[in-house]
Amino acid sequence: MITKSIIFVIKTMYPRYIREIITGRIGSGKAIIITGPRQVGKTTLIESILDSNEYLLLDGDDPKTRTLLTEPNTEQIKSILGSYKFVFIDEAQRIEGIGITMKIITDRLKNIQLFASGSSSFDLTSKINEPLTGRKWEYQLFPISWEEYEMHHGYLHSEQQLENRLLFGMYPDVLNNPKDEINILRNLVSSYLYKDILSYAEIRKPEVLEKLVQALALQVGSEVNYSELAQIVNIDKNTVSKYIDILQKGYIIFKLSSFSRNIRNEIKTNKKIYFYDNGVRNMVIGNFNPLDLRTDKGALWENFLISERIKQITYKQRLSKPYFWRTRQQQEVDFVEEESGNIRGYEFKWKKKNNARLPKTFTSTYNATSKIIDRENFRDFVIIT
């Protein structure tokens, strides 16, 4: 007799910081929109908020739904939505004319609370910004933040997992499959990075995008030169700029500008590029070796810290503006934050160094506070209180 065993995989629902903020906006008369990369939990978050209510789910990935919602008139919209008080349009950017449809719902159907999600800011934002001016609350959702991770697992477990997070990142599916991270990331990168973005942005040369992403991944923490990247990838500088803009709007990378206040020898125009998630970055270069065997440990640490800080600034709606600083004499500050006229400089070290300090040129010129962020005190940086 052969017995079959059924294995149930219980996936963790991580607490999301913006959940209470969004809940507080329900009934405000405006659409609630969440953008962010695929598979970071946008749908899960909205469905958890709506869990105690009856709601209508309209999936923009479904061709029938797209046909149904493509430029309907008011009466057709009323017929589609019926008596539902809560409506959730998932992957709304896939639907033609969705901005006008959402405008009709918010303007004409006052008793309906509309939710929408989108996986790319260049698609959804461009379609809804003008029609929904003054009619929406818009939020971004990223991979799990360190704060959310620690809230769920506790301080001790989180500390023990830090090196794994530098290697495999913070995507929910990665965290929920601790023995299968590489396969999860491989599928994520191949499906989202190289299929969705190519499709949305109508990029006809996927091999060019792949080379560019790999070049950027290898330069994390370094200033990027678009002319050099153009030579590496064998395309023109304007195409490099266009592709980097697409990758940024697709939530793969983000840019830091250089901080400058008219000191003659400061670098004023260069950019640094970071990945929103360490796991995606490591998948792009195909390297998941332990930290002790890596020459890019510093870059991984820097990418992790800055991406976590960006999550905090965004979620907590801080007015902080992030930069880096460097002079032509190679004096450098890894991360600069300007907020309400105050300037803070940070230097990142994996291991504590007693003699580490920020350049006096920077701190004295800008009357800036300074701090060294290392393995021992990083929580002070990645959780803003």
Image (cartoon, grey):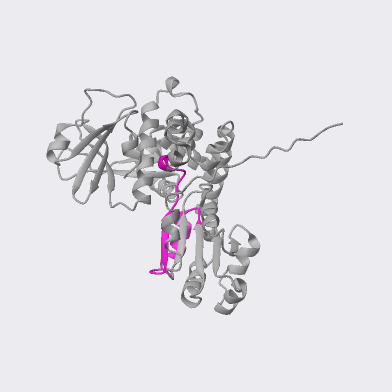
Rendered residue at 58%/31% (across/down): 179
Q: Report the residue that reaches farthest toward the right.
A: 1
Is residue 132 found inside the magenta-colored segment of the image?
Answer: yes
Rendered residue at 42%/53% (across/down): 18
Left or right: residue 307 compared with residue 161: left
Q: Report the residue that reaches farthest toward the bottom.
A: 75
Is residue 217 found inside the magenta-colored segment of the image?
Answer: no
Position of residue 285 measured from the top left corner of the image (x, y, whole percent):
48, 32
Position of residue 7 measured from the top left corner of the image (x, y, whole percent):
69, 37
Position of residue 76 measured from the top left corner of the image (x, y, whole percent):
60, 76
Q: From where the camera sits, is residue 151 visible?
A: yes
Q: Quadrant of the N terminus?
A: top right
Residue placed most toward the observer, 210 or 294? 294
Rendered residue at 51%/61% (across/down): 116
Q: Is residue 72 above or below residue 199?
A: below
Residue placed most toward the observer, 338 or 317? 317
Left or right: residue 333 compared with residue 287: left
Q: Quadrant of the C terminus?
A: top left
Which residues are the magenta region?
Answer: 118-147
Q: In the picture, residue 226 is in which quadrant?
A: top left
**How many dots with numbers?**
0
Q: Is residue 181 above or below residue 46?
A: above
Position of residue 42 measured from the top left corner of the image (x, y, whole percent):
51, 52
Residue placed most toward the observer, 184 or 52? 52
Q: Is residue 138 above or below residue 193?
A: below
Q: From where the camera sits, is residue 224 visible?
A: no
